[in-house]
């Protein structure tokens, strides 16, 4: 009999649960079509489920069709948030907004503004193309120009050409690993006069990373369930792969029987955008594959 251990913290976080409920509620409303700007969450199965309920998906405000006089329609902003300019472009087209930006995503926005206003050279740890970072950069657009850089981690510091007299402000994308951010802060301080850093990494992210790390040290095989485009899920795979054999899958159908040959204990971890249903399916499928159903 195989022992299956689930990470102590896995699956939907508060922000994802909230946006999925908002999307479901909006598709039940009779008042006009509802569009979602971008993928609702980085989980293809969940996006398809919401699409089947009537949600329409667009990649930018330009794709919104013109509204007839008196016609009502709504656009849902997903948990990652968007730049204020994008919200304006939507309302200027006559659409109503339902803003599902996770309240924790707006915290880096506030700190970024404060750091630039206080004259710090801003360094953001994250992926420039990620909507969360685009949202932060958009928030700064109305401020007088200051230097703002986005780096994926401490390895990229050289290209910033920091000087000894620089005053540097640091924030992070909410889903990045705390250890990398702490290293970045230390390495910037070693090169400059002053550092002001805000820990903007979301607690749900830290908890899932900590739980995955602990489990990876305990099991010979760990399955991480979550979307391949999910930033926080990919971080879990990176962390787990340092300590154990790890497979990343979006769906239980990807499980292979041979992975479990001779394995007595397997761990399951899941990103913040992975529904409970997918985690349970993976557990049941593993049991079926090893004849333990
Ligand atoms: S991971 Fe954190 S910041 Fe992102 S949606 Fe979930 S609770 Fe909000």
Image (spheres, rainbow, N blue to C red):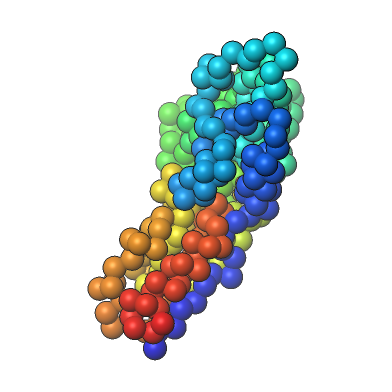
Above or below residue 288? Residue 210 is: above
Residue at image coords 63%, 55%: 13
Residue at image coords 35%, 62%: 253
**Visible residue check, residue 154:** no
The x and y percentages for residue 17 are 65, 52
Residue 224 falls left or right of residue 200 = left
Q: Toward which corner of the image does residue 83 lie, by quadrant?
A: top right
The x and y percentages for residue 47 are 51, 44
The x and y percentages for residue 258 are 25, 73
Farthest-out residue, bottom: 1
Above or below residue 243? Residue 112 is: above
Nearer the observer, 269 or 126:
269
The x and y percentages for residue 121 are 62, 26
Farthest-out residue, top: 69
Nearer the observer, 209 or 280:
280
**Visible residue check, residue 153:** yes
Residue at image coords 43%, 44%: 229
Q: Toward which corner of the image does residue 141 lie, by quadrant?
A: top right
Nearer the observer, 166 or 288:
288
Q: Toward which corner of the image does residue 12 lie, by quadrant?
A: bottom right
Residue 225 falls left or right of residue 25 = left
Farthest-out residue, front: 30
Above or below residue 95? Residue 4 is: below
Above or below residue 82? Residue 285 is: below
């Amino acid at each position: 009999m195989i022992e299956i251990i689930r990470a102590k913290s896995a699956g939907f976080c508060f922000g994802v649960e909230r946006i999925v409920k908002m999307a479901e509620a909006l598709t039940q409303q009779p008042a006009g079509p509802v569009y979602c700007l971008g993928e609702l969450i980085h989980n293809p199965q969940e996006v398809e489920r919401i699409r089947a309920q009537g949600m329409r998906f667009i990649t930018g405000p330009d794709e919104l069709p013109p509204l007839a006089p008196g016609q009502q329609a709504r656009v849902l902003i997903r948990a990652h948030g968007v730049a204020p300019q994008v919200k304006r472009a939507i309302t200027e087209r006559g659409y109503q907004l339902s803003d599902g930006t996770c309240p924790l995503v707006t915290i880096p926005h506030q700190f970024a503004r404060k750091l630039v206003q206080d004259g710090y050279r801003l360094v953001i740890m994250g992926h420039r193309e990620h909507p969360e970072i685009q949202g932060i950069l958009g928030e700064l657009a109305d401020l007088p120009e200051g230097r703002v850089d986005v780096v994926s981690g401490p390895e990229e510091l050289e290209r910033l050409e920091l000087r000894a007299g620089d005053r540097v402000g640091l924030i992070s994308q909410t889903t990045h690993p705390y250890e990398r951010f702490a290293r970045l802060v230390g390495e910037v301080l070693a090169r400059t006069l002053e550092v002001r850093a805000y820990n903007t990494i979301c607690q749900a992210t830290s908890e899932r990373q900590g739980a995955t790390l602990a489990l990876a040290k305990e099991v010979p095989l760990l399955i991480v369930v979550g979307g391949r485009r999910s930033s926080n899920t990919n971080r879990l795979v990176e962390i787990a792969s340092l300590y154990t054999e790890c497979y990343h899958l979006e769906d239980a159908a990807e499980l292979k029987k041979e992975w479990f040959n001779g394995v007595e204990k397997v761990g399951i971890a899941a990103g913040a955008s992975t529904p409970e249903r997918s985690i349970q399916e993976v557990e049941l499928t593993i049991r079926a594959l090893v004849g333990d159903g």
